[in-house]
Amino acid sequence: FYCTDEIVPHSGKQSMLVTGRGYYDSTITIMLPGVNPKSKIEVSCWVHNAPGVLEETYYIRDFFKVNGKLRCHRIGDFVTVKGDEWVKVTASVDLSQLELTDTPAIQIMTYDNGEIGPFYVDDIVVTSDMPGESYDDMNYVEPERGEGLSDTAYRYVPKYTPVQQDIPS
């Protein structure tokens, strides 16, 4: 996965280039650890073919264990993108109808007989009809960062690492 401005994104300044993925490692997996297991979730994203790809079909599936067995079902329609355009892919799943035994997840997939070529995705949105740890952002409070930590969005890493000065000879 790479954030890039190689093509005009659906919105914002960049989109995500998905490349080097195989069918069995999925295309994109989005874990939903804070979702209420009795909620209905809706997922949408915008997809765009890579340059030179004339036609590709995309879909969203769920990916989690129900009663201890892995479930991977398509939860939305197949959407075919022809040429150079952004197309919206949507899906929904009612978790209250399932006996989850694992953290729910969704996957954005291509349907191409196992061959997953590069493509772009933008504006991934996951919503729930019930508040949950990951979705109730009305109460979100930015965590405090200790002095010397970077503002990196996905994790906090030291801005620098002190070098040991008193190395024994």
Image (cartoon, helix red, strand yellow):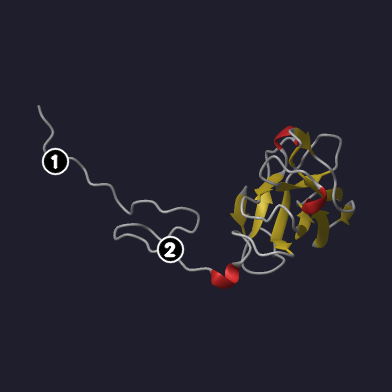
Type of the residue with mark 2? Pro
Left or right of 53 on screen, residue 19: left
Query: In the image, residue 20 lies at what x, y percent?
Result: 67, 38
Q: Is mark 1 on a helix, strand or loop?
A: loop
Residue ID for mark 1: 165
For image coordinates 68% across by 45% down, the residue present is 29
Query: In the image, residue 23 lies at what x, y percent?
Result: 76, 35
Q: Is residue 118 visible?
A: yes
Type of the residue with mark 1? Gln
- Quote the CA–CA distance across marks 1 and 2: 33 Å
Q: In this view, does 65 lie above or below 30?
A: above
Left or right of 169 on screen, residue 130: right
Query: In the image, residue 28 lies at what x, y percent?
Result: 69, 46
**Where the C terminus falls, by quadrant?**
top left
Question: In terms of sequence position, does the residue under pointer 1 or pointer 2 come before the other?
Answer: 2
Residue ID for mark 2: 143
Q: What element carries label 2?
A: loop
Q: Is residue 85 visible?
A: no
Query: In the image, residue 37 lies at what x, y percent?
Result: 71, 52
Crowd rating for badge 1 (residues with CA inside 10 Å; few <14, some 14–19, many 20+): few
Q: Which of marks 1 and 2 is in front?
A: 2
